């Protein structure tokens, strides 16, 4: 499937994308994961992105489009893809539209995960993420805790709080989402591609996405 996942930080895009990859072999492409790995590696991309990320701001559209153009041309994308955290601005959505037309690829669906703000805030402050860049399993200290010693149940690396999950950065990320990313729902609605899902259960969301893609 070729799907865009929209939703505020903490809406469950990453969790749902990971579960959908197991369904039909489509790959998850998370611009957030790509950028965090670059910051960790200390490479040129990471140096450019780090400040924006720590402040909870978006990195520039040009930087993101360079990453995504290269990524969508990789052969593994032929199996289908789940775009998690991209596009995030109208210019990115317009550039993606052009890029997909050039590559002769059609989107199946744009999923809008609609989750109340109080749930989002609670999730973001209790979220832990595996620090191993090849794993990045997502935990929640209340509903899905890592092992008692704070390590990842899958790979044993420490599960940590992300640098952009301080209260200040979270507030900034949510206001950035409302201002820059929410308008994409309207953008894709005009293309007849949006399915809004109101659910807090990732299993339920995954089932609804599978059903919508099959139609
Ligand atoms: P995420 O893990 O998707 O919440 O992304 C973490 C951070 O990476 C965001 O707060 C942004 O600073 C940056 N980022 C990720 N994806 C994008 C994007 N498509 N456009 C701009 N910045 C992004």
Image (tube, helix red, strand yellow):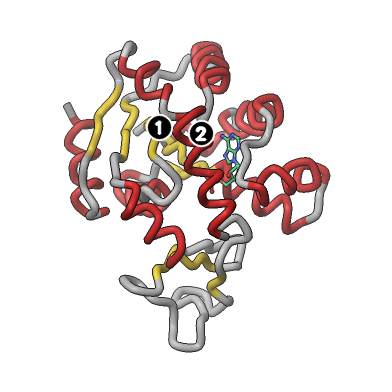
The residue at the point 59 percent across, 28 percent down is 73
Q: Secondary structure at mark 2?
A: loop
Mark 2, ligand 1, within 8 Å: the answer is yes
Residue identified by numbered label 2: 86
**Quarter of the image that includes the C terminus:** top left
Q: For mark 2, does the 10 Å Cα neighbourhood hold few (<14), some (14 to 19), or many (20 or more) residues?
A: many
Q: Is residue 142 above or below residue 56?
A: below
Numbered tag placed on residue 4 in the rendering:
1
Determine the residue positioned at 44% across, 63% down.
138
Extreme-bottom residue of the structure: 149
> Is the residue 157 above or below the residue 4 in the image?
below
Which label sits on residue 176? none
Q: Nearer the viewer, residue 203 or 1?
A: 203
Quarter of the image with the N terminus in it: top left
> Residue 100: percent from the left, percent from the top?
50, 18
In the image, residue 94 lies at what x, y percent? Answer: 52, 15
**Is the residue marked by circle 1 packed among few (<14), some (14-19), or many (20+) residues within 10 Å?**
many
Residue 136: x, y in percent? 53, 62
Q: Quadrant of ligand 1?
A: top right
Q: Position of residue 177 (x, y in %)?
A: 48, 36
**Residue at horizontal 26%, vertical 53%?**
202
- In the picture, measured across the screen, residue 99 lies left or right of residue 123, that is right
Which residue is nearer to you in this view: 102 or 176? 176
- The reply to whether dot 2 and dot 1 touch (C-beta < 8 Å) is yes
Q: In the picture, residue 214 is in which quadrant?
A: top left
The residues tagged by marks 2 and 1 sit, at their Cα atoms, a distance apart of 7 Å
């Amino acid at each position: 499937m070729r799907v865009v996942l929209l939703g505020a930080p903490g809406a469950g895009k990453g969790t749902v994308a990971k579960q959908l990859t197991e369904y039909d072999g489509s790959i998850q492409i998370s611009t957030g994961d790509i950028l965090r790995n670059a910051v960790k590696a200390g490479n040129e991309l990471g140096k450019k992105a780090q400040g924006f990320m720590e402040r909870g701001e978006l990195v520039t559209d040009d930087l993101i489009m360079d990453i995504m153009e290269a990524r969508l041309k990789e052969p593994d994308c032929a199996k289908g893809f789940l775009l998690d955290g991209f596009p995030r601005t109208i210019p990115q959505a317009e550039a993606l539209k052009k890029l997909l037309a050039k590559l002769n690829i059609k989107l199946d669906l744009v999923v809008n995960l609609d989750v109340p703000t109080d749930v989002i805030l609670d999730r973001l402050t209790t979220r832990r993420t595996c620090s191993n860049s090849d794993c990045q399993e997502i935990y929640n200290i209340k509903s899905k805790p890592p092992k008692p010693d704070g390590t990842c149940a899958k790979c044993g690396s420490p599960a940590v709080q992300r640098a952009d999950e301080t209260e200040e950065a979270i507030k900034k990320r949510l206001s950035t989402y409302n201002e820059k990313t929410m308008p994409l729902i309207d953008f894709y609605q005009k293309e007849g591609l949006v399915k809004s899902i109101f659910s807090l259960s990732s299993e339920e969301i995954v089932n609804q996405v599978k059903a919508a893609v099959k139609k």
